[in-house]
């Protein structure tokens, strides 16, 4: 047994899925080293034996056989490099005669799911493929979408105690070289930091993880990600995360989809306009109800004011408490419908939306008009593109409701001004969030 195999056996002595077994390739004794949980050992041994027998019949030398198996590492190998290889699911083939090692690709265990439809972004007309956890598969889907020799992929192994792969993709000739250089420098300067989620990636790239809106636009659809690449943006793919992180993130990403272009131009404009209306309705309607009922009732026509007063007859709470309680209940229903199993989720939604809504009205806890407003807001909140943008929109309306309760209609205008100011303050390496990202030497993709 070579010194490297002995070191690895001591390092993983307490791991039952570690193996170091003896075999023969072209009559040369070898040790096969890896993890049973990552490698299909029986099929891998059969494949190696068949490959060895074919090499013997073709009278291929042992050195050529080693080269055909994988990456040859002659002489004593660094233990850390060998550990990194087998932790990625590689097979280590150590030849006992000359201490050479080969890092080979075995028959892997099927640990990744198949390419499936997106779960958080529904597509009406367009590609139904979605990213999965394997970063190489995700890169392959993007190459199939674009099929261009200008697509550049730079993969970096990041982390120290735990490692993962971070891939940077961009369209050469359309992406700004200075912008890409900034991203590469940021990646290289933090190679020892491990990233597992969006907050970690934000800190890794030098962004504030406490921002309500991320600097990234997230997508799980290769078709949409390919459009961002054609627009000159950069895309980060993190292994074991089925999401593409697009830089820079822009406000228009919440309203425009590539699949919209599968409609005629008038229909595309109509659909995108509906999304803008949905955002305004979500931000304004709850606050407008509070402002007109409790602070500025003189703005209403007398008939509407009487109707609202009659609907609120017997309700013991102020308007502000009434709407905040119902908004929180709606948030609980939405969160429960996401977390519960799919067979139970629709039932809970029906119970919360119909039975609970009818019960609180009959119990004189809220008004009928408020139920209508909440239903409209809940629907309008989901019209924009992207789950993070939807959640950020849900949180922004609370600030405007508070300002409306304090200052009435003027509070709504102040709240909208604050939202606009916050959006205008966001930048990604000097590129404003509210800008239309113009790329040099690129046709504007719209």
Image (cartoon, rainbow, N blue to C red):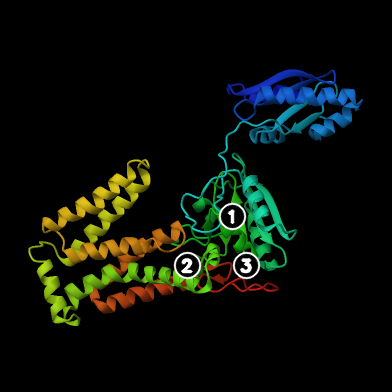
Q: Which residue is mark 2?
A: 255
Of pointers 1 and 3, the one earlier in the residue sequence: 1
Q: Which residue is mark 1?
A: 222
Q: Residue at x 86, y 26 (%)?
A: 55
**Which label number is shown at residue 231?**
3
Which residue is nearer to you in this view: 189 or 232? Answer: 232
Which residue is nearer to you in this view: 421 or 332? Answer: 332
Which label lies toward us, 1 or 3? 1
Q: Is residue 44 above or below residue 285?
A: above
Q: Dot 1, how many residues are within 10 Å of its Cα: few (below 14), some (14-19), or many (20+)? A: many
Q: Residue at x 73, y 22 (%)?
A: 46
Residue 49 falls in image quadrant: top right
Q: Quadrant of the N terminus?
A: top right
**Which label number is shown at residue 238?**
none
Of pointers 2 and 3, the one earlier in the residue sequence: 3
Q: Secondary structure at mark 3?
A: loop
Which residue is nearer to you in this view: 246 or 285? Answer: 285
Taking the image as drawn, is residue 58 in sight? yes
Q: Residue at x 29, y 64 (%)?
A: 376
Q: Quadrant of the C terminus?
A: bottom right
Q: Residue at x 81, y 34 (%)?
A: 72
Q: Position of residue 112 (x, y in %)?
A: 57, 38
Taking the image as drawn, is residue 395 in sight? no
Q: Is residue 207 above or below residue 440?
A: above
Q: Is there a contact, CB below 8 Å, between mark 1 and mark 3?
A: no
Residue 205 falls in image quadrant: bottom right
């Amino acid at each position: 047994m070579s010194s490297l195999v002995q070191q690895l056996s001591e390092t993983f002595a307490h791991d039952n899925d570690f193996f170091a077994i003896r075999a023969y390739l072209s009559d040369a004794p070898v040790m096969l080293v890896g993890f049973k949980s990552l490698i299909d050992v029986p099929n891998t041994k059969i494949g190696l034996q068949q490959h060895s027998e074919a090499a013997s019949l073709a009278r291929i030398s042992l050195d050529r056989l080693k080269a055909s198996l994988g990456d040859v590492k002659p002489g004593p190998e660094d233990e850390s490099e060998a550990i990194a290889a087998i932790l990625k699911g590689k097979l280590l083939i150590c030849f006992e005669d000359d201490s050479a090692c080969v890092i080979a690709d075995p028959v892997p265990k099927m640990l990744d799911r198949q390419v499936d439809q997106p779960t958080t972004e529904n597509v009406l007309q367009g590609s139904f493929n979605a990213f999965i956890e394997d970063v190489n598969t995700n890169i392959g889907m993007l190459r199939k979408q674009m099929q261009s020799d200008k697509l550049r992929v730079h993969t970096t192994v990041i982390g120290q105690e735990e490692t993962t792969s971070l891939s940077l993709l961009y369209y050469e000739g359309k992406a700004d070289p200075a912008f890409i250089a900034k991203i590469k420098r940021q990646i290289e300067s933090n190679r020892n930091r491990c990233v597992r989620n969006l907050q970690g990636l934000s800190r890794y790239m030098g962004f504030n993880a406490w921002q309500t809106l991320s600097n990234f636009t997230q997508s799980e659809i290769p078709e949409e990600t390919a459009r961002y690449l054609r627009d000159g943006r950069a895309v980060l793919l993190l292994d074991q995360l089925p999401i593409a992180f697009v830089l820079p993130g822009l406000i228009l990403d919440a309203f425009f989809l590539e699949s919209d272009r599968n409609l005629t131009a008038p229909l595309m404009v109509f659909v995108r306009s509906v999304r803008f209306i949905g955002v305004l309705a979500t931000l304004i309607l709850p606050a407008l109800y509070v402002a007109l009922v409790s602070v500025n009732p003189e703005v209403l026509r007398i008939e509407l004011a009487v109707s609202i007063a009659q609907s609120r007859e017997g309700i013991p709470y102020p308007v502000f408490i009434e709407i905040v309680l119902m908004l929180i209940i709606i948030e609980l229903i939405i969160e429960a419908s996401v977390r519960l199993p799919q067979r139970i989720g629709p039932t809970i939604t029906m119970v919360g939306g119909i039975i609970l809504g009818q019960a609180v009205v009959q119990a004189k806890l809220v008004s009928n008009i408020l139920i209508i407003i909440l239903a409209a807001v809940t629907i309008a909140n989901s019209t924009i593109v992207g789950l993070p943008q939807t959640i950020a929109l849900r949180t922004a309306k609370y600030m405007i409701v508070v300002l409306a309760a304090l200052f009435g209609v003027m509070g709504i205008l102040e709240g909208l001004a604050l939202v606009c100011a916050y959006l205008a303050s966001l930048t990604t390496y000097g590129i404003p969030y509210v800008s239309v990202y113009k790329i040099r030497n690129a046709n504007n993709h719209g």
